[in-house]
Amino acid sequence: MSNSKISSKKASVRKDECVACGSCALQCQNRAIHIMNGQFAVIDAERCIGCGTCVMICPASVIHI
Amino acid sequence: MKKKWYQYLWIASSVYLLLGFFNIIFSWLGLLCFLTPLVISIVKGSKSYCNKYCGRGQLLHILGNQCGLSRKTDIPAFLRSKWFRYGFLVFFLTMFVSMIITTYFVFSGKNSLKEVVTLLWSIKIPWQWTFDFNGIHPGFVQFAYGFYSVMLTSTLLAILTMILFKPRSWCVYCPMGTMTQLICKTKNKAISE
């Protein structure tokens, strides 16, 4: 991962609207996302580098940085 | 990173759709796409089918992101609202039950086999070239036609929303995804109480 993609901001999920499809988790190169019990995505703030891949990929547009 | 075996399930999904053009009986295999996520969500309380094993989701990702067929715009708010998602689930299940009733009438001999694939629950396409049904009960074949209609219709909707919005927009209103998420929420709520 290049340094240009590292941001101090972290991704966050609107859990109520998340459809738990898991496409964000599949694309996250830092494995910072997992789906909590089939209900919603959870982002590990320590692993998230704020690259924004999950924001672009989320079909329900419920992830923001 | 070395790819896992399940990352190739998009090939199975593509082959499944093609098989229906050669022999409609293969559409019975599609039941796996219905039963597997249900069993996983009921037994494990997770959506790992959607998260890992859904060949359709993988196919939409490839077509939209790698082949560049998607506009990659946000899905309209009403399509991701709970009203639409649960409403579409109810509609989908109603049409599924209707298909089962049609199959029952053919099984019982009240109606004859209709060799048509129905797209978008209304457009009937003659589909009698796919097999010589001698020796197979017409009811068995009728279910194959009905189920293939469901699979082809949902694939068309998935491709349409893949093109218009983000690649995996189908996942937002996929009835199986909505149903398994509901099961997971209910199951995990029951555990935590």
Image (cartoon, coloured by chain):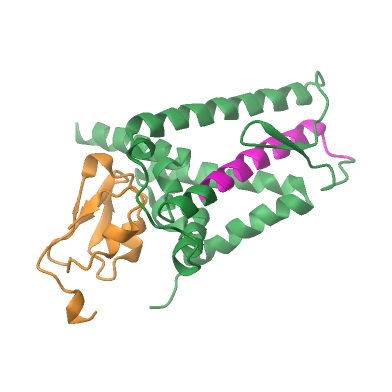
Chain colours: A orange, B green
Residue B60 in sight here: yes
Q: Is residue B105 magenta?
A: no
Q: Which stretch appears magenta? A: B135-158
Question: Number of marks in the image?
Answer: 0
Q: Quadrant of residue A31?
A: bottom left
Taking the image as shown, residue A65 lies to the left or right of residue B103, namely left
Taking the image as shown, residue B91 lies to the left or right of residue B124, namely left
Q: Quadrant of residue A4?
A: bottom left
Residue at 29 percent of width and 71 percent of height: A29
| B91 vs B174: above or below | above
Residue B140 x %, y %: 75, 35
Residue at 51 percent of width and 62 percent of height: B63
Taking the image as shown, residue B117 lies to the left or right of residue B5, namely right
Residue projecting furthest to the top = B110
Residue A44 x %, y %: 17, 60
Q: Quadrant of the N terminus of chain B?
A: bottom left
Q: Quadrant of residue A54?
A: bottom left
Q: Give the camera-side residue of A64 and A39.
A: A64
| B34 vs B64: above or below | above
Residue B47 x %, y %: 38, 48
Residue at 33 percent of width and 32 percent of height: B82
| A1 vs B101: above or below | below
Q: Main secondary structure of the magenta part?
A: helix
Q: Quadrant of the C terminus of chain B?
A: top left
Residue projecting furthest to the bottom = A2
Residue B42 in sight here: no
Residue B24 x %, y %: 75, 46
| B81 vs B18: above or below | above
